[in-house]
Image (spheres, rainbow, N blue to C red):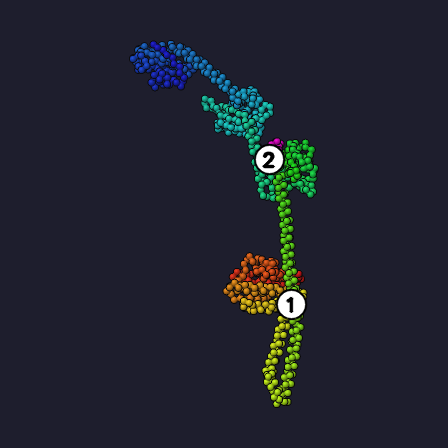
Amino acid sequence: MPVSVLSPRWTAVATASADDLHLDLKSAALFAQGECVTSMLAAQPDSLSVLPTTVQVLPVFVSDVLWGALSFDFSDASTLLQPDQINALSSFIIGLGVALQRQQDLCRSLVEKTAESRFRDLLETIEDLIWEVDEQAVYTYVSPQVKKLLGYAPEEVIGQKLDALMLVDQQSLASAIIRRCVSQHQGFSRVEVRRLSKAGRQIVVESNGVPFFDDQGNFKGYRGIDRDVTDRKAAEVELYHQHCLIELRAMVDSILARNIPLPQMLDQCTTILVQQLNVGVVRVWTLNPDTQMLELRSSAGHCIDSDHYYRRVAMGDLAIGFIAKSRCPLLTNDVQSESHIQRKNWALEAGLKAFAGYPLIVNEQLIGVISLFAQQDLPDDTLEMLSFIAGEIAEGIHRKQSEAALAKSEAQLRRKADALKLTLSKLRKTQAQLVQSEKMSSLGQLVAGIAHEINNPVNFIQGNVRYSQDYFGSLVQAVALYQQEHPTPSPTLLAALDELDLPFIQRDLPKVLASMEMGADRIQTIVSTLKVFACLDETGVKPIDVQSGLDSALMILRSRFSENPAHIRIAVERDYGDVVMVNGVVGHLNQVFMNLLTNAVDALHDAVARQIQLVPKIMIRTVQLNADQVRVEISDNAGGMSQAVQKQIFDPFFTTKPIGQGTGLGLSTCYQIVVNEHHGQISCDSQVGEGTRFILHLPTAAMALTPVV
């Protein structure tokens, strides 16, 4: 009777009863309940026996735990164990179970010791801190690396709370994370925590943890790893700090490159420095070269309430004056111990502990000073960047000051150029006025001479014509009396009378004398008109009849209206309104009328010469606008002027006439007389292809006039 002892694990009992023991399902169920089962097996392929086998299996229990089975194979079913035999084997079965249990415990212990040894060897090679806490977040295990990381021995840490070695300001955060993870039985990863080493040094660790449970699924705590990332975080902070400094420099460069006024540029720079460096106050002074005083130009920050104290600083006074005078930076992370810094109580109340001040120098020339107060220490790289930024701000201030000086110089040059241009314009106008005045003076002298030379003979002729008429009348009467007394003259006398044609003489001589008298009167009228036009007998400001002045100018130019080489007949239309006298200088206003009418006649002659189809015409109109102004219009239909010409017609020496035919002084003189001398207005309205109209507005009220030289 072969006997086999099976000692599978509990999880393998069912499969052992079905596979290894070849039990059916019903027998397997009884076996699991501790019953002795009997099963008939067919011949197995790997067995030498070809006969069926009966198997009787006894379970081996220890403390109600199935540890294995004792099986008996019978080729004859009649030889199966009987109940008394089974009872006799019970002690043997119990001993067999205990032996099996001890063997399994020994194997398990060996495996666990081997695994624990391997695990501890592995932990000692890992740089990270391995830890375990229970459900109350109390350390139950820490790896030996805790000594290297935090300076504590493992036994000093075990039994403490998870947050015991954290900074105070992070304990609440860690507790919150733990409570959330415990409540949800979730793990956490990459949580940065600042721990405090035994030596008082802050250590930044990256913590990862996972929950663990017992066999019944109850939460038992966390197991995790802490990795020291202090150096990495310091490198990240340094990299970020450098990035911020580079960004700050770029921002300042961008501000300095903008085309904005100096005050706005400095305000933006100080504001950026305060924001990017997180300092209390930033101020910039510029040096006034005249007073040698540093003048506050810009400030920013939350501590600018004391700006009035630093509004103007003398060279050598306070820390700012010391920096300017010494031309050296003043740097300290302990404001209270710096002798050059006054108002230490103000700095203490504001929490300011660091100060940095730099002279602003360009090409060895002091431009100003920049300074800042900070609540925190200023590292060397920040001070180095501030020194560089101070140099750039100095360049920016110098550039803006140079631009302002250049703009001021350009403005002065422009003013001088404008003054020179005005002087040149006045000189040209004065020159034109002198030329025109000399011209009019010569004309006046010529008119005076002509009038004098003509007036005397004309007066002689006119006076003698009357006597001649009287004498001729007397002679005619005498001849008539003689004919009455001697009705029969001698043949010789009759022949002489026939030859003389005495009746014709008696009829024609009165006509000749009357014609001579009419000519003398005409000459006197012309002389009088010349005298009126040239004002040889009138000087100073007085009421003037503008319509009389217009008529005088027309009469002088009458020959040009019809008697000209081109045989052009120019029609003149007068539309005189009921106007009052205007105040002015008669000769000067007559000169204006003469120039305007002459230009109209010249324009019409030129238009006809260019074969423009038109009926030459000059229109003169006077209107009383109001009690203070009289309007005079002189128009022609000669074809008009372009806008470009109209803009220059009143400029001295500008003319559209060929060389030798125009001086360019006529309209310029008209403008001076009407606008500058008589305080009136003169304008031109011209349309190409239609004609030109000059419009004068002359004041009627008495006023002080400015004479034209």
Gap in Å between the C-alphas at discs 2 and 1? 92 Å
* Residue 626 visible in this rendered orientation of the protein: no
Find out whether residue 79 is within the magenta segment.
no
Q: Residue 458 occupies which quadrant of the picture?
A: bottom right
The magenta region covers: 377-386
Residue extending farthest to the left is 50
Of the residues shown, which amino acid type is indicated by label 2?
A: Leu
Mark 1 or mark 2, which is nearer the start of the sequence?
A: 2
Query: Where is mark 1, residue-wise?
Result: 447
The secondary structure making up most of the magenta span is helix
Is mark 2 in CB contact (under 8 Å) with mark 1?
A: no
Of the residues shown, which amino acid type is indicated by label 1?
A: Val
Q: Considering depth in this image, is 402 or 428 the residue closer to the camera?
A: 428
Query: Where is mark 2, residue-wise?
Result: 277
Location of residue 354 with respect to 159 vertically, above or below: below
Q: Which mark is residue 593?
A: none
| Mark 2 secondary-structure assignment | helix
- Write the residue at 61% across / 75% down: 518
Select label 2 or label 1 by which is in front: 1
